[in-house]
Image: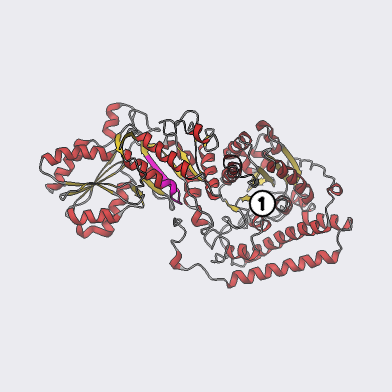
Amino acid sequence: MAETLMFNALREAIDEEMARDETVFVLGEDVGHYGGSYKVTKDLYQKYGELRVLDTPIAENSFTGMAVGAAMTGLRPIIEGMNMGFLLLAFNQIANNAGMLRYTSGGNFKIPMVIRGPGGVGRQLGAEHSQRLEAYFQAVPGLKIVACSTAYNAKGLLKSAIRDDNPVLFFEHVLLYNLKEDLPNHEYLVPLDKAEVVRPGKDVTILTYSRMRHHVMQAVKGLVAKGIDPEVIDLISLKPLDFATIGASIQKTHRVIIVEECMKTGGIGAEIIASINDQYFDELDAPVVRLSSQDIPTPYNGKLESLTIVQPKQIETAVEHMVALRV
Amino acid sequence: MVQERTLPQFQAPAAQISAEEGLMLYEDMVLGRFFEDKCAEMYYRGKMFGFVHLYNGQEAVSTGVIKALRHDDYVCSTYRDHVHALSAGVPAQNVMAELFGKETGCSRGRGGSMHLFSSEHNLLGGFAFIGEGIPVALGAAFQSRYRRDALGQADADQVTACFFGDGTTNNGQFFECLNMAALWNLPILFVVENNKWAIGMAHERATSQPEIYRKASVFGMPGVEVDGMDVLAVRTAAQTAIARARAGEGPTLIECLTYRFRGHSLADPDELRSKVEKETWLARDPIKRFEVYLLENNLVDEDTLRGIRDRVQTLIDDALTFAEESPEPSPDDLYKYIFAES
């Protein structure tokens, strides 16, 4: 076991996969000489050369499209979004080309590519650098969407994403890069399509992902002290959703709270609720509750920013209310 | 009407092609023309749907460039892609079947007119939005260089030909990709089919510098202006650019001055282009012009050309029968091809 910071866990994943498969390469803004804005690709260009760790001009739509073309012709590109928000500029290439091209071409081409980088609300970074694009992209057919949350799952998931033959949007969280964890010395993979039961419990199911997992676990401490036994599930795969795991939990607890960092309107939680209503309505003892970010551009002011995203205390209160059936 | 640009002079006799080469080029252009004429007929008869953009008049560009490529080179096209697909070797019957939405189509009926693909023929698409194909083509060219220089595969010398129109050259992706192609010395041809009109927007009304080939110079890239109605002029320019690219000397921008003989799509009332302009360009029909060249230089006789036209017409008729008789995709396969199975 070796204590590893999350950004280094991601770096190890890329390094191992580049060593294993010479068609894997990284491209993006400042991924080479600079080592990536969060040092995920630090010094890799010295090991693999400048073509395999390619510093691109600031042209998100064009270098994303270029990665699609490289993937269609047999390479396995990893795009780093310096900030995932910048990839709004590449929306067309991600949606029309990465996401839909395999289908539109009738299976002529596959697009094995990973688009990864820091997303989420940081500390007073302002609206444009505080995006949660997973909600914007979830309607695009053909994309897989994954959010990592610990050093362990970050490494294993990224390795799986690189080996997947489909385009994977891989969300890291800007505030989690310095999480520490002992990682196995041996190679391991984490499957892209499985949710993680973080804490088994019987009273209520809490569905969450990315940084909100850690807010939830803070709230759980208080809840357990009050004799409440919640089950916490980290969704991991935001598309497709792992309804085998989610459904099994609902059949056990009959109560669901969703805690997400994306905005409420058209968010990941909205989709989950619709699917729960389709498949598990009869299992529910209470309406599903979702705690989401406010439907506003993330404000710069620190107090307003903290009011924008869900805080552990709110989660605790919402769970207590639900368990007392005061929802 | 804006003053027509003077077409660059090209000394065709100096091209010195063989009869066999001439017939190959002629047949490919005739194939493109007859195929599109059949599409128009089928569209107006209600057998073909959606937006259908025909290539009539521009055949010298597709034939001139693609027939100078090797079979393992790459072709990337736009929504006006039928004839590029045919030149790249996709059988006419599979293109026609795609337009009929059939399972035997080159995109298995999922793509349609604007989304023709064939991995077997290295046809990268069929891209319907303006400019989005250019980065994809750039990626194929990058892949060739990556295999050669990062993986040490000495035989990785494939070239990519990327086609787009005059309207696209005002889009950021055009400039971004010219920059990256020159920066990384990628083996790619940027082939502009300047047919003077982006639907109803005259080229001169959309750009501050109508001479597109000049835009290459700021990237330190050769830019060539070619008479796009002369297949030998296009072929000669393409051969030079392909040789450069294959030798690792980087990209070339080729501006082909051409004209579409039909509207933007079959749904376009085509009310803005003047009669004088259309007649000026119709008189430059690249197929008729090449016929005259072949006959005047005693490379072939009229009977041979007629034989080719008859053979192509039969091929098109057979393609139509194939398309009409082919099955539609099964409803059971509605979700097939969303994801690749690893």
Magenta stretch: includes residue A167: yes
Q: Quadrant of the N terminus of chain B?
A: top right
Q: Position of residue B328 (x, y in %)?
A: 52, 69
Find numbered disc 1 in the image and state the secondary structure of the residue it sits on: loop
Relative to the observer, which residue lies in front, B101 or A294?
Answer: B101
In the image, taking residue A285 as reference, residue B275 lies left or right, namely right
* Image point (66%, 59%), residue name: B89
Q: Nearer the viewer, residue A198 or B133?
A: A198
Residue A137 is at least partly visible in this image: no
Residue bounds of the magenta highlight: A161-171
In screen coordinates, is A181 left or right of B312?
left
Q: Confirm whether the magenta stretch covers residue A40.
A: no
Say what amino acid the circle numbered 1 marks.
Glu
Which residue lies under the disc numbered 1? B271
Residue B61, given in percent of the width and then of the height, sits at: 72, 50
B152 sits to left or right of A297 = right
Q: Is residue A161 visible?
A: yes
Provide residue A52's location: percent of width, then percent of height.
52, 38
Residue B302 appears at what percent x and percent y? Answer: 85, 64
**Quarter of the image where the C terminus of chain B is located:** bottom left
The answer to which quarter of the image holds residue A307 is top left
Q: Chain of mark 1?
A: B
Camera-side residue of B252 and B46: B252
Above or below for B316 versus A238 = below
Q: Residue furthest left?
A: A227
Taking the spot 67% from the left edge, 60% from the top edge, the residue there is B36
- What color scheme is it? secondary structure
